[in-house]
Amino acid sequence: MFVGGEFYYDGEWLLAQPVPTAEKRCFLNGGRACLAVIGDYLIEHSIREILLPSYLCPSILDSLERCELKYDFFQVNEDLSVDLEDFAQKAGGYEAVYLINYFGFEHPSVVRDHLKSLQEKGMLVVEDNAQAGFSAHPVGDFVFNSLRKLVPFDGGYLDTDLEIAPYLLKYQARPNRRLPLIRDYRQRLHDYLVGGTCSYKKLVGLYSRADRYYESDLVVEGDPGEQARIERLDWAGIRQRRRENYSYLLGLIAPIREVKPIFPALQPDMMPMGLPVYLEGVSRDAVYEHLGENGIGLFIHWEELRHDARTNSNTLAVSMASRMLTLAIDQRTSRAQLEYLADTLANGIQKVRRNT
């Protein structure tokens, strides 16, 4: 049995008719593309520094540095909440701030109200919903997502009332060398997992080439074919399935004392990306390896943070990244797969304990 991993085509969640997004949302190639446009806008409006959360993927810094934006960090607590005291001390010196809705969970009203008060004084808020999809209660002046983290399609929506059309012009007509490769990969991955008809080596090669192009080619324009499929997805059904899986898996892992859920309850209407947990008293990396050996492909958010010189001076963030693991609860996952995941996780923890 397999659980998690990259998304593949299966057609299960496609509707007969599209469900268009709001008109002011601009469809771009993904989260990185959205950040490129946001960064260009900030620089053009003489905003050259932005305040970031201490817990983030270093690829965000790559995007901001490309625009020559400078940055500093406010502290994020172990439960992924904002350290409001640290934030308040630092925010006064910045005209822009970056907020991440981790794993789809919105920040509490005290944080959102504080941001609104800063917006009234002229601060711009960049709201990162890469892990949240479509937020029901956005607060940002820029709100963007990255849908390849949730479904097998490339693209992201940038939602803003600010004028961004001039910042799209320089990226027009750039070839998307990644797209044919990742489409081939997603088709072959389904064949490999379900029917065993594709070689693992071929899959790795396709994904590696697609990933290299994603890093090297700054493609901003969204692909109409990807957008058409995204807008035919049953997003309400996907959200409901993810919520059901999240709640079910919470119950399955409750007896495992080494596993500590970061968010022990779902918020109303939200769509969780995964079920993030800390592993306590046992090596996360050793357990992660055991899961991989047993067909369970999970993600670590964010492993890169531990090794990047720009982020690894924050001891709390490094500790969090060293212990965190995101359990799969996406819409592909059946209850049998969730049970297999929980059993394998418990067995892996016991195995690692015995070996140490």
Image (spheres, rainbow, N blue to C red):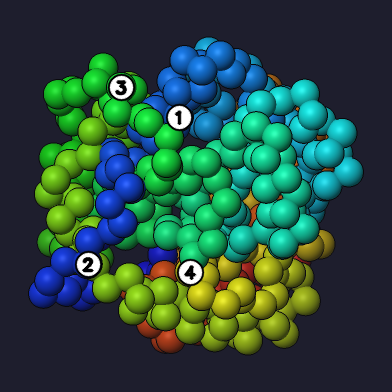
Q: Quadrant of residue 234?
A: bottom left
**Extreme front residue here?**
120
Image: 3 above or below 252: above
Residue 80 higher or lower than 317, as above or below? below
Query: Which of disc 3 and disc 2 is earlier in sequence?
Result: 2
Residue to which mark 4 is pinned: 271
Q: Which residue is mark 1?
A: 38
Q: Position of residue 42 (x, y in %)?
A: 51, 22
> Marks 1 and 3: which is nearer the front?
3
Say how many tags the image has. 4
Tell me the residue at 23%/33% (across/down): 221
Q: In screen coordinates, is 319 left or right of 309?
A: right
Q: Amino acid at mark 1?
A: Ile
Say whether residue 98 is left or right of residue 3. Answer: right
Tag shown at residue 19: 2
Q: Nearer the viewer, mark 4 or mark 1?
A: 1
| CB-based contact (under 8 Å), mark 2 and mark 1 | no
Can residue 35 be spotted in the picture?
yes
Q: Amino acid at mark 2?
A: Val
Asked whether 292 or 158 is in front, the reply is 158
Q: Which residue is mark 3?
A: 166
Q: Is residue 248 left or right of residue 176?
A: right
